[in-house]
Structures are given as C-alpha cells and as structure tokens.
Amino acid sequence: MHDVAIIGLGQVPVGEHWDMGLRQLALGAIHAALQDAGIERVDALIVGNALGGNLSAQNHLGTLIADFAGLSGVEAWRVEAADASGGMALRQGYLAVASGQAETVLVVGVEKATDRTGSERETALTTLLDADYEATPGGTPAAMAALLMRRYMHEFGVTLEQFEPFSINAHANGALNANAMYRNKLRPGAFAKAPIVADPVNLFDSAPEGDGAAAVVLTRARAALDMVPQPVLIKGSAAATDTLALHNRPDLLFLRAANLAAGRAYEQAGIRPADLHLAELHDSFTVLTALQLEAIGFAARGAGWKLAVEGAIQRGGRLPISTFGGLKARGNPLGATGVYQAVEVALQLRGAAGDNQVPGARLGLALNLGGLGSTAVAHVLERME
Amino acid sequence: MHDVAIIGLGQVPVGEHWDMGLRQLALGAIHAALQDAGIERVDALIVGNALGGNLSAQNHLGTLIADFAGLSGVEAWRVEAADASGGMALRQGYLAVASGQAETVLVVGVEKATDRTGSERETALTTLLDADYEATPGGTPAAMAALLMRRYMHEFGVTLEQFEPFSINAHANGALNANAMYRNKLRPGAFAKAPIVADPVNLFDSAPEGDGAAAVVLTRARAALDMVPQPVLIKGSAAATDTLALHNRPDLLFLRAANLAAGRAYEQAGIRPADLHLAELHDSFTVLTALQLEAIGFAARGAGWKLAVEGAIQRGGRLPISTFGGLKARGNPLGATGVYQAVEVALQLRGAAGDNQVPGARLGLALNLGGLGSTAVAHVLERME
C-alpha cells in the first residue's frame, strides 16, 4: 500500500453563483488545484456531489466534469454520501492512490445549491434523510437538528445562549476568508434573538447552503516532496455510518459514526486527539459541533459546548475549529464541503492560511458528516518536511 | 497491492417490483451474496445506483442500505456513473480491497426504476445525458441511440434487419433465466416491424428499464480459496470516459471509453480479446452492442453486426454475449446493471450458470457503459482453482 499525499489545492468562493453551473464551478477549482500541483494530467477524477440529479437535473458528473476539464479519457466517477460526499470522494481518491492503480488523482467536490429555492430546495435536501420515514412525514435537516438540539438542552441543562460562541467563532474566522459566503461578524447577544428556522434552531445557528467547488490533487507520498515544496500527508483516512433515521438510534446524543471514523483515523495515524493542532468539523448546526467534539475525544458527554464558551475553539485556543469560517460562515456547499475542509486543513499545515493561520499547525483533522451524523468521514493530515 | 477475488454472488429477479423500494431490493441481493460467501460482516459497503435521488427522492444510499441490512457502523457510500454505476461500484470495491484498507467488501447495485412512469421516468433518464446541451433541447437516451444507429446504417450500409440477431440471441438466453425481466423468445422477422421508440430504434431493439439489485462480495484472492469452493479472480479492472455529449465526439462511431477501458483491463490481465470465453456487454441498444464488439477487439470498424448474423455471439459461438439475456431480456436496472453483469460472468466461470452455461468458460469480460458510451468500466474475471 502506498502512502498518499496532497500536492495541489484549489477552491472557488462559496456563494450564489447564478452565472455558473456545476461544470463551470468544478473547473475553477480543478484548474487552481492542477496549477498548484504543477501538473496537467491525472489518472482519475473523482467528483463529490450530493444533489446534482435533484437540483440541476444532472447526474453522470464524473464524466461531465472530466470532459469539460479537458481530461476526457481519464477514468471518472461520482461519489455520493449526502453532505459527506466531498470527504468520501477524498477517501476514494486515497484508496485509488493507495492501491497502486492510480498514481495521481484529482478529487473535486462541487455543488450547485442555489438554482432552486424555497420548497424545491428543501425537498431536494430531504433526499439526504430517510425519505420513507423522515422526509415523507415532513422532516427536514433543520427540523431533525432541532430535535437533537432540544434534547441536548434538556438532557444537559444547556441554554440556547450557550451555543452562541460556536457561531461567533465561525463568523470571526469567516470574516478573514475571501472564499467565505458570509464575511460579517456576529454581534455578541444577537444569536438567541435570530429568526427561528426550526425551533430552537435559528438563522445564526444553521449553516447556509451555497454553490461552490474545491479540489485536491493526490499522489504517492514518496514522490510528493520532489513535486511540490509543501505536500501534506494523509496520515489517516476512515469512514463509518450510523442509522440514517434519527429515531433508530439507541443513544440520540452520541454521534457513533463520527466516533468510529475519527477513532479509526487516529489509530491509523498513530495519534491521540490531543496531538491535533486544529480540526475542521461539520458545523452545519451548532448542536452537531458540540456533539462532534464529544464523539471525537475532546469533551465529555454533554460538555462539548463548554469548549466554545471557554474559547478553546478559537484560533489561539486548544483546538481551533472552523478556522476559515466553517460551514456556518464559509458556507455549506453540501457535496463539496468535505473537500473545502481538506483544502483548509492543508492550507493551515502548509502555513499558507494567511490571516486565518493557526500558528504552528502541523497536524489537523477534517471531519465531514452526511445527514445528521449518519455518515462520517475523517482524515488526519500532517505537514510533510 | 492485493489481488482481489469475488467470493459471493446475489441477485433478485429484474422486473416491476411495486411491493419493494430501494432498500428492500438491495437487501435481497445482499443477503444472497453474504450467504453465498458464508460470511456475515464486511468492512465496507459500496452501492451502485444511478437515479435514486430522481426516481425515489432518496439519496444517501450507502448509509440507508448499510443501516437496513444490519451493517450499520460499516463504512458505506454510493457510486454514481449513470448506467455504469454498478460496474464503477465494483471497481471501487476492487480498489478498497486492493489497497489493503478493507479486507472484505460488499458491492451492491440497485435501482428502482418503475415507480415513475412516462415523462417523469424519461426526464430522470435524461439526467444521465448532458443536461444543458442534450436534455434541454429534448434529447433522450433512445433518441441519442437512434442518431448513432442511423449513422451506423448510413456509414456501413447496414439494414435494420441486420441488427435483429442481437435481440434474438438476448431473448433466447433470457428465456432460460429465472431472473430475467422478459422470458419470451423473439420470433425471427418480428424485429424490424416492432413499434418505433425513436426511429430507427424500436421496442425490440432497446432494453427495458427494470427494478433490480445484484451484489458481490470481494476479498483478498490469497484468502479466497480457503473461504469458498469457487472464487473468481478479478484479473483486470479499468474504467475510462469519453465526451458526455455525442456531438462533441470527433468520431461518432468509435466507442473510445469502451476501447480504453477494455484495453487497460486486458493489459492488466495479460490477455488478448481472443482469450475470452464470454463477454457481458452493455446491450441497451443493438447499435451499442455492435460498436462495443468493434471497440474491444472482436470486429473491424463497421463489422460488429456480422458477429451476430454469423452466430458468433450465441452460447455455442466464438464469443457468447448476453448469456443470461443481457440488458435486452434480463432487463436494464440502470445503476444495478454492472453488478448483474459481474454476477452472470462469475456464475459462468463457476460452471453454475445452469441452462445458460457457456461450456468450458474460464475467462470472461463484463463491460458496463454509462450513457451512450460516455463512461465504460471493464472487468476481466477468471475462474480460480
């Protein structure tokens, strides 16, 4: 098995790109990543995308994008795992290089989320839940997050205000990131008064869906140091699943998939959670962030929110998260999100994060979730020297 | 890199399963494959599916099916490459085992095609084409196949009647297969008089979409012979792409993706086309079958149809194809088709094909296409002893 390194990074700003479709968005990220890696051809193209079939009437995205990017002939396919599609695509790229079957692989996450609005977009989003048992009775991702949050508040005696520091941190970092969808800071005290999306989840609590694309180029680690000045090693790669429907979980407030995926990735990397210098978590809703911190070894059950209140998650803190704004402020381009996370962690490890830099970052985690933690993909990345 | 073998096979009959959804169909195939392999757990589940988001309002199928099959916790994801999703999922399973990251992997192809009818189904099918440049102006897969067929007839002076033997062969074999969607034989002379779908493509020319699921269990070849009496080696695995839209091809009548994928798979397997004892091709339209035979080394340009006329494709012939009925008679469950092909080739190599047996089959090819040959996945399988 070959060790695998990231040698190229690309992204386009997350936002409402009404002048671009899936292929144009993907191309922007692909060109940037290939240029960054200093190469023109790859052996395979893997596309992470959640909702192309529903929001753009376009499936078959591997071939579409390979064709449009001038890579026709190359093998290409799409990986779909809801909003964990991007992280899962990265894992497939990892497997393709690790197996020896491909020497260089391009992974692109892309989503065109804003061409449909209102109930059309909402209906598409519910295809990421259990259609028969959650979506048909009217459930949406925000409604499911609301159930989790209400239970969390009840079980652990936490108030709505105590989730605020997660969003303040995300927006503080997003304000410095030119690729972020929202660059406004959040005024302390505003959180709990924000318009309700699905009580108690509100506008400042939930991440906005946006259009976007991010790409990474992977190759064998042995060759990476000769190709680029600052490759990043994929030291651990793992994925896991939980029940798709929330009502089937024996323990609603334990993110089993996140726990399993992170645990396997730590084990492969030979690290402990405390060794990490930063983590990009899937902060689509603040309660999910708290639950992730608890599931991946940073807080006891019911205590994840305290890390935010104590400031541990800020760039100067013990475990910086959402260092470029996270899903909350950088935006949540669904099937592209996991690749954005990997790009951001890699930029941190390269020391190339600019205003968003976490000082001395050498080891980072990217944790991408699908649905309400039904799928989890974890990657431990390390600076190579 | 580990060599990879198939140790379990499962399938459900292709048809109109109005009493079953995606998860129930998948479960039938999964249980059969696990039982066949004599195991209960796997390290990963890979789902090949083309249109779940569009036809069943259900994405996130890896996790859905892992959960329903009692495999929750395992890593799982969906691979989508139009109607090549099944073959591509098999290739991902191959990469996962070859890389050493997974010891045993379950690959299931599943499609629920008949819950939507008429224009709803047709619209979903066009998401496999280029939405912006083919579907929006009104193109459908059958219409695109009609363009190819008309051009083929014009270019090579072939008549409609000369495609008939492809369908007669498929139905002759399908009639013997309990899992086939259509078990009727085709009366000689009926073909050219069949109702038109998209002139010159007619009803007896085009494969019917059906519901279905097929599954294979993969593990390291080294261990396979100790686990089951008749494992099948994946001797070659490859994929390739062509332009998504037909109008962008410099040579309309050359299936470049099929040529590249089969060529790479032959090379990896160290074989020549003439070494194969059978091939399951993607016979969604007869013209595609002729073009595949030409692209993968069995006939000169413009001469693929002659293999059918000469009887070479029959079970006693030089290169038997559609040995269980092919897409035409077994049915075309879109994203599941590639896994059915693998199951069928493996049954032949095991000598377990019953009435459909190709005598002495030891080496076979499965070639799965997405769209009008825009994606191709080729697997060379060999009997292990």
Image (cartoon, coloured by chain):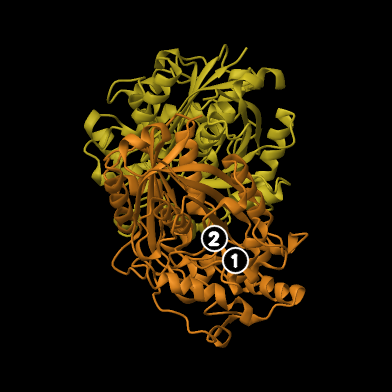
Chain colours: A yellow, B orange
Q: Are marks 2 and 1 in contact (CB under 8 Å)?
A: yes
Location of residue B308 in the rendering, given as x and y in whole percent from the top left corner: 59, 71
Please tell me if label 2 and label 1 are on a single chain.
yes
What is the three-letter code of the residue carrying label 1? Thr
Q: Is residue A160 left or right of residue A180?
A: left
**Residue flagged by tag 2: what amino acid is it?**
Leu
Q: Residue at x 51, y 29 (%)?
A: B1
Residue picked out by circle 1: B289
Residue A342: image quadrant is top right
Q: Is residue B57 above or below residue A169?
A: below
Q: Nearer the viewer, residue B182 or B85?
A: B182
Q: Residues within 10 Å of mark 2 (few under 14, many from 20)?
A: many
> Mark 2 — residue?
B281
Residue in view at x 52 percent, y 74 percent? B167
What residue do we see at 74% from left, 32% from top?
A39
In this rendering, is residue B43 above or below B240? Answer: above
Let me know if residue B190 appears in the view.
yes
Percent position (x, y) of residue A18? 65, 53
Give the camera-side residue of A203 and B351: B351
Q: Chain of mark 2?
A: B
Secondary element at image label 2: loop
Residue B97 place in picture, x, y as percent = 45, 35
Residue B336: x percent and y percent?
44, 57
What is the chain letter for disc 1?
A: B
